[in-house]
Image (cartoon, grey):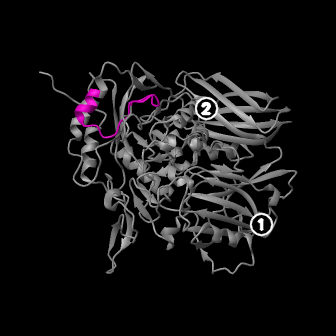
Amino acid sequence: LGYKRLPMRVSQMRFLESLTAARQAACQPILPATTNYHQSSHPATTTIAPNVWKMDNLDWKFQLRNTVEEALKVVHDPNQPTRPWSSMEIPSNWMMRGFDRPIYTNVKYPFPCVPPFVPEQNPTGIYRLQFDLPQTWQLETQDASYSFLFHGVESSCFIYLNGHLLGYSSDSRLPCEVDATQYLKKTENILQVVVIRWSDGSYMEDQDHWWMAGIHRSVELIQKKKQMLIRDFRVQADASGCLSIVVDAADSSPSSKIVARLYEDQQTSPDGGVEEGKLIWTSYSVLDRSSIVISDTVANPKLWSAEIPNLYTLTISLESDHRVDQVESCRVGFRTVEVDNGCIQINGERITFCGVNRHEHDPDHGKVVSLERTKQDIEICKQNNFNSIRTCHYPNDSTFYRLCDFYGIYVCDEANIETHGILPMGKLAHDWHWQNSFTSRITRMVQRDRNHASIVLWSLGNEAGRGKNLWLAREKLLDLDDSRPIMYESGGSIIEGVGRTELTDVICPMYPDVDKTLWLGTRDDEDRPLVLCEYSHAMGNSNGNLDLYWKEFWSNDRPRMQGGFIWDMIDQGLRKRDENGREYYAYGGDFGEKIHDRQFCINGIFSPDRDPHPAVQELKFLQQPVAFSLNS
């Protein structure tokens, strides 16, 4: 839920000013933005995206208060007696910086479960940043608009600029953008963000990982010049070469046109860089209405798959009088995802999901996962024959999807929804008061991520029961994008889900044994594919019968059995030192918290530092895409 949030848009929007910059931007693993704007004596570190200022490395200050009311008093009353401010790194979780404590639970909530109420004693952080606008930005409100974009804040936040409330947001894993035009000054701006640890949104985020808090993804200030009318764009490119582009504009402008161009550019490495290729297709449409559709067929495109992730660069420019007013761009993969004859097919070929569930986790930084760590995760997946990742149980940072497009990973993109600790589990899914919480978390995920070729499945969430709110959210998802199957496990039984309700296009149960997996994948009254959303819980000395699962997954006699996602990838240990200075990985209860689920977060096939456990070698062998047999 949110107050005065701007509409969600695709993550690739960067408000660029040249085709060259747009082609470079598309091939970057991190969303391009300009840094070092805050000191006029230092040149900007990039000129690709001069209208997006990344504010991460500025002089952020921080206080932690015991209640929301205390924190808001600090914001609203400048004369309020205040405590000393501490420096705070952005992005970060404040419990990883010496404030408060992390809490791990699997199912139970770490506070009394009485939705939507939360405890009065509620750790609340105040982030404060004083800044001047970049000298190259001319603050003329009639010539531009300005907005703050927070890519991730846990669990909810109020955003203030110069004492004025800009907006409120409650969703820890998706961006929040608020308009700042009315209250922004050229110099001496004060941005204050009041971040609340427990909110009504926390009831939707009970996801078997560490409960953290803070601004854990990047913060940006965006300048949208008056002539920049493009507000969003969406792209679909299928295996037949059909390319469909929809551009949403702030207004019509019959003297302007939208020009789309497709290039054979090559991204030279996962760190970015572009080797420019030839222009292979172009088309345009006059901007005579606020939504423009460009549809055409590209002859003989090279197709995208996890094995051969061919990508093109698409630029979309707003041009008038031989002038380029705005350019947006993204990487495009031509591929078709469909369910045919009971099987998920990519480009007409049945695939097997050699998958793993991945939480965003770093042993030193909590929910802040760097570019290097994200690359490491994807590379060790590829090295060990994993071809797919489920983003358990929330949308990831946008860098993850850009890298999956590049490396070639099939992604199940999961909405930020789990109500596991509520009895019954589906209580909120049936309660119309929570309808917008369900629908907005699902539709906003799709609106942000839908241009990524790597996403081949949408998930409505995890362990949230079965109810009318999820049914409505599914319908709204299909209105936005019907090009990918939907998978959702929960509902259909009193306690856990069966993965076979009307909410899912894919039978996707959790932890069926091999016999039940075989039964689900061969029963005569089903025509849906079978993909285990979780299996072989990797805790302790487990993973003992993996070969039996994979014998069935690879069988040519059972085409609907298409693999699964092992639980899970990373041991969620946090690095800590004992009284003798020796390092160890801490789990639930190691931080003095009273409510916790002990070592249940230590259930990955890799250590927190990504060292492989023994099961990885076996999985690499079992998932290898080539098999030999001797027939006498």
Which badge, 2 or 1, is on the more N-terminal residue? 1
- Which element is circle 1 on? loop
Q: Quadrant of the C terminus?
A: top left
Q: Is residue 397 left or right of residue 182?
A: left
Disc 2 to disc 1, how far (Cα)? 37 Å
**Based on the displayed image, in which of its 4 quarters is residue 502 positioned?**
top left
Q: In the rendering, at what x and y percent does residue 602 appear? A: 32, 57
Query: Image point 34% across, 25% down: which residue?
Result: 560
Q: In the rendering, at what x and y percent does residue 320 appear? A: 84, 36
Judging depth in this view, the residue of 532 and 171 nearest the camera is 171
Mark 1: which amino acid?
A: Asn
Judging depth in this view, the residue of 349 and 544 nearest the camera is 544
Tag 1 residue: 162
Q: In the rendering, at what x and y percent does residue 504 appear? A: 45, 31
* Residue 150 can be seen, yes or no: no
Judging depth in this view, the residue of 198 and 446 nearest the camera is 198
- Which element is circle 2 on? helix
Tag 2 residue: 480
Question: In the displayed structure, would residue 349 be above or below residue 599?
Answer: above
Question: In the displayed structure, would residue 434 be above or below residue 89?
Answer: above
Mark 2, residues whose alpha carbon is within 10 Å: few (<14), some, or many (≥20)? Answer: few
**Based on the displayed image, in which of its 4 quarters is residue 434 positioned?**
top right
Query: Image point 41% across, 38% down: which residue?
Result: 490
Q: Which residues are magenta?
A: 500-519
